[in-house]
Amino acid sequence: CFVIDNIFFNDKKINKLISKIKNNKIKIFKFRYNNKFEPSYEYLEEVRNKISQNFDLIIALGGGSTIDFAKGLAIVLSNHKKSIFYRGFPKKVNTPINLIAIPTTPSTGSDVSYNAVFTEKKTKTKMGINYLYNYPILSIHDTYFMEKADKKIIFNSICASLVRSIESYYSKNSNSISKILSVNSLQLIVENFENYLKKKKEFHGQCLLLASSLSMTALANSGGGLGGVPAYYLSANYNIPQSIGYSISGFKIILENYKIYSNSYLEL
């Protein structure tokens, strides 16, 4: 099963890959993820009820919402209760379908985590489907897809990764290893952010995709900061993409902390 973001659904490179797979007599189901906002439990249930096939593998290609949706699909297609039942941190869940993640933006982090963001429309509650054994079995970083994305999307994505690397570093639960990941993520962003936006070179794109994965791995092992709280609220209530909400709230909090503590740091 291919779960493909609407922008890339008819992409030549993807269709060429699918044709090669079909030539090996492997059955393919191709699903277009065209949900305008982050996925909801209701949307997941709607799609799940339309699919009758059994899958050995799901390949998700797109931004964080596309990959998160595919993770949710991997669970509900292997289980029998309604999608809303698996919100939060479900237990006693049948093994999800194996999933390969191909992120097209450098902010998702979904390619290296088991968390999948979902919102309940009725209550405007954002809890997700978070099952420990729902990590992608493989993640592929290919800047070909980043080069086709709008610069604004890439800009927002990188800003979100930047905030995540800073918040994970200063988290009270961070440790010596997670801090190394945070610092490396931050360094990769600082060194490649501007160059990529100007030139869109493959090397810079690869570095930014890696930075995103490192920042999420750091966050997963340290816990988030305050920036994620208003970002969830903005997303659930106003359909503001997570990357934008997280960047706005994160940078504001960082700036206010800098105003409060900068003199102390200068004295030290």
Image (tube, helix red, strand yellow):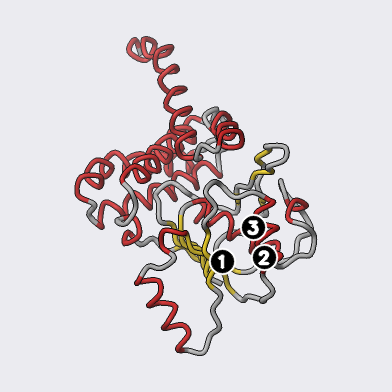
Q: CA distance from mark 2 to mark 3?
A: 9 Å
Q: Quadrant of the N terminus?
A: bottom right
Left or right, 6 with respect to 189, comes to: right
Mark 2 touching mark 1, by CB under 8 A? Answer: yes
Q: Specify the quadrant of the image occupied by residue 215.
A: top left
- Up/down of 8 relative to 233, above or below: below
Q: Which residue is mark 1?
A: 99
- Up/down of 45 relative to 22, above or below: above
Q: Given the current orientation, which residue lies at the most extreme left position?
A: 199
Q: Amino acid at mark 2?
A: Pro
Q: Which residue is mark 2?
A: 96
The label number, if any, that marks residue 72 in the structure image: 3
Q: Residue at x 42, y 27 (%)?
A: 251
Q: Specify the quadrant of the image occupied by residue 233.
A: top right
Q: Specify the quadrant of the image occupied by residue 238.
A: top right
- Up/down of 207 relative to 74, above or below: above
Image position, residue 52 (x, y; %): 69, 74
